[in-house]
Image: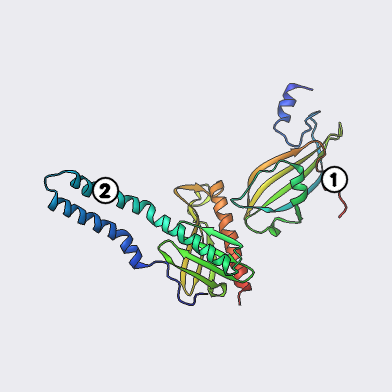
Amino acid sequence: MGIFRKMRAAFHDDWCNLCQSEMDVVHKQLYALPDLTVDHYISHETADYYREHLVPVSKKAQIPPGMYACGLHAYRCPNCGHRRTKLTIFLPVRDQEKIEEILFFDHGELDGFLYQPL
Amino acid sequence: MNCEPVKKKNTAYLLSYIFVPAAITALCFWLGYVFFHDGGAGAVILFMVPPALSILWWMFGGKLIFKGKRKKLIRELEDSGFHPNHTFDSDGCTVIVDIQQGKLALVFFWNPFQSYVLPASRITKIWTDDGKTGIGPLAGSSRVSFLFTIDGIRIRVNTFTSNRRWRMDSEYILTGISKADMMAEALIEAKERSV
């Protein structure tokens, strides 16, 4: 694998960090974070926090003003089978988004949460 | 619960806040001139201490009074069974909303000795103002606020102010709009639940 591809992979969230292939999105969901409101944002880096506090919503309009939202993308590499979950925590403001933090979970920390029966 | 009309400014307080320290300073200058014409410790005290205290009073006095009255109001509300779902402190006014009971409490910087607890049904109009001026890439704002009218009196609460103009997609403006929208939503909900 060329060094240039490795460098390019560093700028692509959806590229596998093991084999630098483009990963497939296997799951996508928008969540509300009722625990976090505007001006009271606290960074949480553990998967446990998100397992407990994410509330699934179908569209952004369902999230009340001032409440943080989280976009979840679950990726799977078609070459090596590596899986990665990306959480984008943002504040929805009318038709815009103020991104606060982007977190990656590469060791299946959120698998139980993602594939839990409804 | 207050029934009297809301007063954002207490004129007597406003005038005394500005002119009483100025008058005391002028009096001390006159006393210093009359009794310590030749100088000395008395002259130094009379000519230096009152202006310094006046400046400190103008800089911090109002803020301390407002902060104290705000704390007192919050304590009183807690004792009276008011559930503060949303509290917003701005430099000119504090708004506390109890959504369940449909009430709101107000205290103003220029009228700190009078606080108001009102049914939210007295609010006639609620809206947010993003302060946007300019078009396209030149659009920007230096102030974001939410506004409401009570008995025809317009109350503006700033959620963001700046001495410079910011792009509409800057994080300061977005945070200000989010806060304003959240408070406007809380007021609308309280008004709907108010009897």
Mark 1 is on which residue type?
Gly
Q: Residue at x 34, y 53 (%)?
A: B57
Is disc 1 surrounded by few (<14), some (14 to 19) or many (20+) residues within 10 Å? Answer: few
Indicate which label's residue lies in the foreground, 1 or 2.
2
Mark 2 is on which residue type?
Val
- Could you tell whether B137 is left or right of B60 in the image? right
- Could you tell whether B26 is left or right of B187 in the image? left
- Residue A15: image location, x then y, percent: 77, 34
Of the numbered discs in the image, which one, if any, rests on residue B49?
A: 2
Is disc 2 surrounded by few (<14), some (14 to 19) or many (20+) residues within 10 Å? Answer: few
- Residue B179: image location, x then y, percent: 57, 56
Display colour scheme: rainbow
- Residue B183: image location, x then y, percent: 57, 61
Q: On the same chain: label 1 and label 2? A: no
Nearest to the observer: residue B11 or residue B20: B20
Pointer 1: what residue?
A112
Q: Residue at x 71, y 26 (%)?
A: A7
- Could you tell whether B100 is left or right of B74 in the image? right
Q: Chain of mark 1?
A: A
Nearest to the observer: residue B33 or residue A52: B33
Element type where label 1 sits in the image: helix
Task: Please determine whether, in this image, residue B19 is positioned above or below residue A80.
Answer: below
Q: Chain of mark 2?
A: B
- Could you tell whether B192 is left or right of B30 in the image? right
Rounded to the nearest whole Å, what is the CA distance between mark 1 and mark 2?
A: 69 Å
